[in-house]
Image: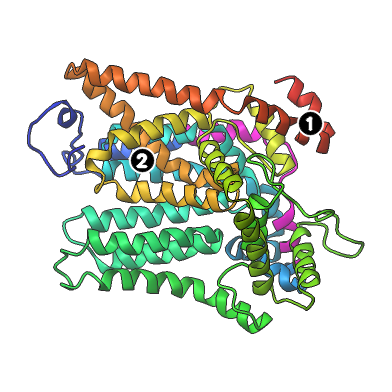
Amino acid sequence: MTDRNNKKPGNALDMLRRNSHGDDSLFLRPDFQWGVLLFLIALAIRIAFYFILCDAQVFAKYTVLAREMANGADLGQRLLDVSPFYLSLLGALAKIAPRTLDYLPFIQLVAGALVCLLIYALGLRLFTRQVGFAAGLIYAMYGNGMILESTLEPYVFVLLFNGISIYLLTRAAHGQEASPWLIAGAGIFSGLSVLAKPNFILFIIFACVWIHFALRNSKIYNKANLYPLLYIITAMMVIAPVTVRNYVKFNDFVLVTADYGKVFFHGNAGATTVFIPQYLPGQDKPPAGELPVDYAHVVFRKKASELAGRPLSPSEAARFWTRFTLADFKKHPWKHVQLEGRKLALFFHNFEIHHIQANHYRYVRSLGYPFVGFGLIASLGLLGMVLCLKQGKRFALLYGVVGVYLVSGLIFVVNSRYRAPAVPYLCLFAGAVFHYTAAFFVERKNMALAASLLALACLLALTHWTYADQIKEYMGAVLSMYPDLKTTTSTN
């Protein structure tokens, strides 16, 4: 790839670039017109999805908690189990405009179309218009993305917030001069992303290192270490109110949520397999009088206190389950090395694991429609990551955010909700594959073209044909838990 401001004539890669500055009017610029077209395509696909496939009961946890909160109920420690941003958003809607919750799946699908525009904007900034449009179109047609967007979970806001953050950081690094406002804006949206899903804190750590090296030659401050400091301060200013609320309300230091120990147990405890997490017996069966959603967090805290022999605070309970699980690491290290290797392979596999019945129902039904699957995105994305290695510094942020969600999956659980935030960036690398292979064809680099196509075929085989027995076992377990899925599964 060449820098977008480089106008020198060159090879076929340069010839594929576009010039978006020829028209004075924004509405006449090709970049704007292609962006509008992409948004309309993504929106049309999502409208069709909403009326054809969006008929299963959405995940009810957040709506139940939001309505309770809007009615003045004290949720107690349940506040520490869920996304603070999303619960606050739904709580405000439940109080101000309760009917809005009925249409929220559609509203979130519209937001998903905006994610396609963010991908396109990143493609314009880092690659070319063609790459950005191809990447946005791939995401627009990603079936499980629409399933997750329409589920009442914070997924689509995670994509919006971290996408804006990465776009602002990219502008700061590749513009004429880095602006403190861009860095501060990136920090704000990174903080919002953490409040939507706390594992993005891993990206904040990575971004601080990236900012130091990417902007160390900036002329504004002459001291590059001020930029990482500005970034992390603005991010923490967004996160801090939740941390303070947690400390004041529960007399406990909880940065955002206190469920990491529970999820770490699910993904790594003794009986865990790559497809099926370990659960505590009866964790999802609340007694009479308790809120009938997501009761497992309460069970985990109670069980931790019982095993510890004393009452534990939420943060102590999270650390208890982390230590409990690490003890199994020490006892059976080779088993866990194998498990992490399987998680790594599963992260890029075509099969979508859903631990929410409504999501799995929609996924099974969606297989009868011509949506893009994760395996194709992952295969193209991995090949694109290899092809872009020569300019790895330019695309370091994209490599970093994919790596953050990969590491998060290895630490916790690899399922569709946890790996899906990496999809927009895999789509950008996937779009780069079309760019490079077209250039290889035009320049008659037959060996490079043949090697790329062969590598893609191998990746497609690995992401689609492995884990056949495990998938069959997993589907059997799901169908035993949800008998009403049998008819739908058999027809697809």
Q: Nearer the viewer, residue 396 or 12?
A: 396
Tell me which label, 1 or 2, sits earlier in the chain. 2
Residue drawn at (15%, 63%) of the image: 217
- Residue 256 picture location, percent across and down: 57, 69
Q: Is residue 467 left or right of residue 463?
A: right
Amino acid found under the numbered disc labelled 2 = Tyr
Which of the image's four quarters has the N terminus?
Answer: top left
Q: Is residue 75 left or right of residue 446?
A: right
Q: Quadrant of residue 53?
A: top right
Q: Quadrant of residue 26?
A: top left
Residue drawn at (60%, 43%) of the image: 415
Q: Which residue is mark 2?
A: 120
Residue drawn at (29%, 33%) of the image: 387
In this view, the residue farthest toward the left is 8
Is any part of residue 82 visible from this angle? no
Q: Which residues are magenta?
A: 41-68
Q: Quadrant of residue 218?
A: bottom left
Q: Main secondary structure of the magenta part?
A: helix
Q: How is the image coloured?
A: rainbow
Q: Is residue 466 above or below residue 57?
A: above
- Residue 180 picture location, percent across and down: 27, 68
Residue drawn at (72%, 67%) of the image: 78
Q: Is residue 430 magenta?
A: no
Task: Count residues near mark 2 (Cα–Cα under 10 Å), then give few for <14, some for 14-19, many for 20+.
Answer: many
- Residue 76 picture location, percent across and down: 74, 73
Amino acid found under the numbered disc labelled 1 = Leu
Residue 485, label in figure = 1
| Separation (CA) of disc 1 from disc 2 | 37 Å
Is any part of residue 236 visible from this angle? yes
Q: Is residue 6 above or below residue 230?
A: above
Task: Count residues near mark 1 (Cα–Cα under 10 Å), then give few for <14, some for 14-19, many for 20+.
Answer: some
- Residue 388 picture location, percent across and down: 28, 37
